[in-house]
Image (spheres, rainbow, N blue to C red):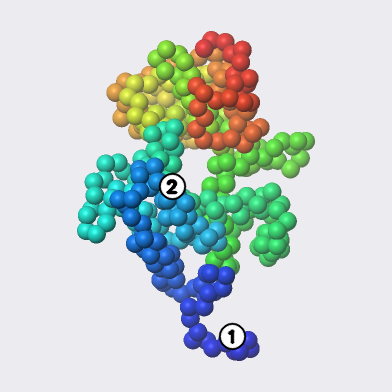
Amino acid sequence: MQELGLNNTIEHINYLGLPLFRSCQKNVDFNFILDNLISKHHGWKLKSLSKAGRPTLIKSVGLALPIYTMQTTMLSKKLTSKVDGMVRDFWWGCEQGNRGTYLKAWDHLCLPKSRGGLSFCKSSEMDQVLLAKWGWALLNEDKSLCCKVLRAKYMRGKEIFQCSFRSSDSWFWENVVHTKDILRKGACRLISNGKDTSIWDDPWSAGVVVFRNEDGKFTNCFTFRLVVSEPLLGEIMVLCKGAEEALKLGYSKMIFQNDSSTATAALKSNRQEVGSLHHNIQEQVAAFRYYVDQLELWEVSWIPRNCNGVAHSVAKWANQNNQFGWIDLSSENGTLPPALAGMECL
């Protein structure tokens, strides 16, 4: 600092709109986000905005203000909660001492419109996504100057999944490393000759949960990244995920079908028998029982593999197109329906 002619006591220096030096009080360094949001909020007039205008203003201004900072900084949960709280209050008409009426939870409003929400974004999740983009860029060998510096200084020939951080590393690198778990959920290694792929450690398979209604019609499905090397564990993890998502959708009666007789038998075990199962699947079986015990009625049944073609086709499609999350099978168009054509035993 002295060599650069700067005083050691200098604080609150900004560079490109962000604090150049960080203090021990992280929230204090980024309180300017709340100050900017408050100033914007005071200029918004609820009475002059329609119900359609409010979400537009929230998405384009309220939730967009912190995005610039979030691209390099992991904000504290306390700060992101305050941002979401101010936006939530505005949506429900809280102003000048009027608390308004909160008819829906914020979690529900943040769901996609196809699932009954308004597609608002939680600030903490958006923060993680923006930082994970740097990890994704490193995985795809992006040629930007920032990625080149990170590769040369921290990675040194390793992949982001193999990297860690030390206390002496920069806060930016630490934030990027923290997003590895997010990348593992969606990253997919494309197999060519298999020379650089580890079947034990690399994410190369997908899990698929397919939902049908009481008429047998396919409604939607959920795809996610599987990072397991044991087929039995993978089968049970898929059924466990299906039970979890069914509860989120509000279903009370479920029939779980699977083409693995071993997985089906394991999931039919009662609580006293779980401890006698193979140790690798005990945790997932216990989790499955926890979810289904909240259902009104449930059953696990085995089906032949040739009757489970939809799940396998969707898994292949998800891997090839790197598409993970909810897929609406009732209205999906494009490359997915041909993958489902010709399926038998539906």
Q: Does any portion of residue 192 appear in the rendered image?
A: yes
Q: Which mark is residue 56?
A: 2
**Residue type indicated by callout 1:** Met
* For residue 55, above or below residue 3: above
Residue 253 on image: x %, y %: 34, 21
Residue 243 on image: x %, y %: 41, 29
Quadrant of the frame with the N terminus = bottom right
Q: Does any portion of residue 34 appear in the rendered image?
A: no
* Mark 2, other Cα within 10 Å: few <14 / some 14–19 / many ≥20: few
* For residue 3, above or below residue 151: below
Residue 229 on image: x %, y %: 59, 35
Quarter-wise, where is residue 215 in the image?
Answer: top left
Decide which of tag 1 and tag 2 comes sooner along the chain: 1
Q: Which mark is residue 339?
A: none
**Residue type indicated by callout 2:** Thr
Residue 205 on image: x %, y %: 61, 33
Which label sits in the foreground, 1 or 2? Answer: 2
Residue located 57% across and 87% down the image: 6
Residue located 36% across and 40% down the image: 108
Q: Residue furthest front?
A: 48
Which residue is denoted by mark 1 in the rendering? Answer: 1
Residue located 42% across and 25% down the image: 267
Is there a contact, CB below 8 Å, between mark 1 and mark 2?
A: no
* In front of the other: 340 or 269: 340
Quarter-wise, where is residue 97 in the image?
Answer: bottom left
Residue located 57% across and 41% down the image: 186
**Dot 1: what SS?**
loop
Q: Is residue 102 left or right of residue 213?
A: left
Count of numbered marks: 2
Q: Label 1 to label 2, Cα distance in Å?
A: 45 Å
* In front of the other: 57 or 108: 57
**Dot 2: what SS?**
helix
